[in-house]
Image (tube, rainbow, N blue to C red):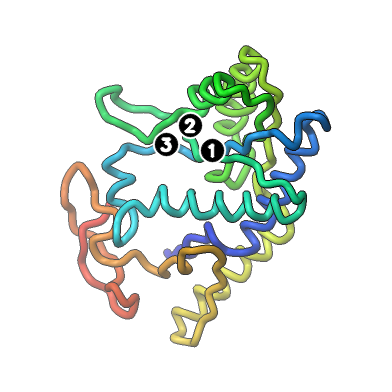
Amino acid sequence: LDRLRAYFNHPRFVEPVVDATLTALADLPEEARNGAHLVFVTHSVPLAMAAGSGPEGNAYVDEHLSVSALVADGVAAVTGNRLGWDLVFCSRSGSPRVPWLEPDVNDHLDTLAAASVDAVAIVPIGFVSDHMEVVHDLDTEAAQTAARLGLRFSRAPTAGTHPRFVSAIVDLLLERAAAERGEPVNRPAVGDLRAAWDCCPARCCPNPAATRPSVGAAADDTSMVVGSHR
């Protein structure tokens, strides 16, 4: 059993999200588009889990911020208009005593409305299909919050079956197979972060509950070692 590397900054993931964001902006009334605010949404996780993500920590938030900035830049390049944007979270669960990443998308819509923002384009940057969580948390709850606040609201579709995203998955599969064969591999990536590692390095994403043995790759991705993973 193997997995593809993380592809948050693969150009053919970023491009479909730019297209989707432009679609969401086009769904807003024309007079509201230039002042719309982009709200990038991903799944919240406990703060401890976010802090331990990636080999150097904080990868979960850093990667989402990086790809959100890339999408905002792509929208600006097409429209000539640089919109404000934020990264927010949804689907918090678990014990209320455990701190999770914030702000929640609904709370953030309150904040934007209080700041006299008139329209929002919601971009589910952390999801790749329009599954029921997206439909409930964004199309239902967030849309209702926006309506209560008088915010004009639209939601970008996820990358889903966009041809460029599908071709990226094919390329990632071929890339992973080539790496396993020991062949030189080109790993496309855009933005300020490098392409993600093939295998999780040792001590990556530790289990916040307890240290447990598992198999992971060494820091140089060339051998397998025992580490403590989630």
Residue at 64%, 22% (x, y): give it.
Answer: 143
Mark 2 neighbour density, 10 Å: few (under 14) some (14–19) many (20 or more): many
Please name the amino acid that badge 2 sits on. Answer: Cys
Residue 228, x across and y down, in percent = 21, 58
| SS type, badge 1 | strand
Q: Residue at x 68, y 27 (%)?
A: 119
Q: Is residue 43 found left or right of 33 in the rendered image?
A: left
The residue tagged 3 is: 44
Q: Mark 1: which amino acid?
A: Val
First in sequence, mark 1 or 2: give its number. 1
Q: Quadrant of residue 172?
A: bottom right
Disc 1 packing (10 Å; few <14; some 14–19; many ≥20): many
Real-space Cα separation, disc 2 to disc 3, in angstroms: 6 Å
Residue 161 at least partly seen? no
Q: Quadrant of residue 122?
A: top right
The residue at which mark 2 appears reads as: 90
